[in-house]
């Protein structure tokens, strides 16, 4: 058995092992984790944090994030997926019979890499670089990992789809953050290193209490998903 054959076999077996955790509570919870609109309250709080701390600069931050999402989503979905042409597990007739499919959801034809993983890790990476707060960074990458894991559990992605998607998303975030910093310095004479940092602020001058508010909202949403999943299946 060569390396690639062994890797692909591991990929399929790991998918089946994770998908085999199937139970009604996890089905509902994983389904909600993958729903973008569920996290909309956190997006509103994020905008509040940006506007409060960065004022007019918020326009450029939001533009950078929007362009980042367009880049990761389009490159992953419209370029890499058809180029690689790897069928999703739910579209592979050799794998589908062994999967527990949730809500009859099969996804699109191709699955490599995972757009959900790419987008989640792109946001996690960019916002972590933006805020420069250790607690936030650990929390947001944990959130991104949960979203990515839910795609494997639902059977619509292999682990390698998610791993590569996550890596692509993070590298894209680093690239767009570097571009954002360059533009701010080049066109707006922005030099963070010379600014005074008051107590209670991160190195990038975000109030720590505002970042904690954002984390509290994310935690509240997550807890609400756990509770709603319990009562739906109770």
Image (cartoon, rainbow, N blue to C red):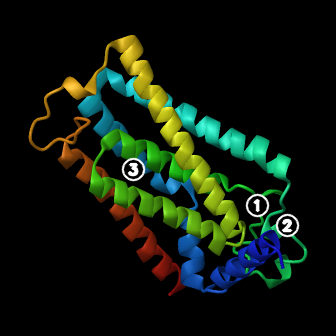
* 121, 55: nearer the viewer: 121
* 214, 71: nearer the viewer: 71
Residue 44 appearing in the image = no
Query: Residue drawn 46% across and 54% down?
Result: 39
Residue 42, label in figure: 3
Q: Is residue 120 left or right of residue 83?
A: left
Residue 6 appearing in the image = yes
List x then y, in percent, for residue 129.
Answer: 38, 42
List x then y, in percent, for residue 79.
Answer: 78, 41
Residue 165, label in figure: none
List x then y, in percent, for residue 139.
Answer: 36, 60
Q: Is residue 153 left or right of residue 16?
A: left
Q: Quadrant of residue 157?
A: bottom right
Q: Which residue is mark 2?
A: 91
Mark 1, secondary structure of its residue: loop
Q: Which residue is mark 1?
A: 107
CB within 8 Å, label 2 to label 1: yes
Q: Quadrant of the N terminus?
A: bottom right
């Amino acid at each position: 058995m060569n390396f690639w054959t062994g890797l692909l076999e591991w990929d399929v077996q790991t998918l089946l092992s994770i998908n085999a955790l199937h139970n009604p509570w996890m089905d509902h919870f994983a389904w909600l984790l993958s729903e973008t609109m569920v996290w909309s309250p956190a997006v509103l709080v994020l905008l509040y944090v940006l506007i409060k701390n960065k004022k007019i600069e918020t326009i450029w931050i939001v533009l950078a994030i929007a362009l980042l999402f367009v880049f990761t989503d389009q490159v992953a979905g419209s370029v890499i997926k058809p180029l690689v042409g790897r069928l999703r597990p739910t579209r592979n007739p050799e794998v589908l019979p062994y999967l527990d499919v949730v809500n009859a959801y099969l996804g699109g034809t191709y699955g490599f890499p995972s757009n959900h993983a790419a987008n989640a890790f792109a946001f996690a990476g960019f916002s972590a670089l933006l805020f420069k707060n250790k607690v936030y960074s650990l929390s947001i990458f944990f959130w991104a990992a949960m979203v990515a894991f839910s795609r494997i559990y639902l059977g619509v992605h292999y682990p390698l789809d998610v791993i590569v998607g996550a890596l692509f998303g993070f590298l894209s975030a680093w690239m767009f953050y570097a571009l954002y910093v360059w533009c701010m310095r080049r066109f707006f004479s922005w030099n963070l290193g010379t600014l005074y940092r008051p107590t209670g602020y991160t190195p990038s001058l975000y109030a720590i209490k505002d970042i904690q508010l954002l984390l509290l909202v994310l935690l509240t949403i997550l807890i609400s998903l756990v509770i709603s999943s319990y009562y739906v299946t109770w």
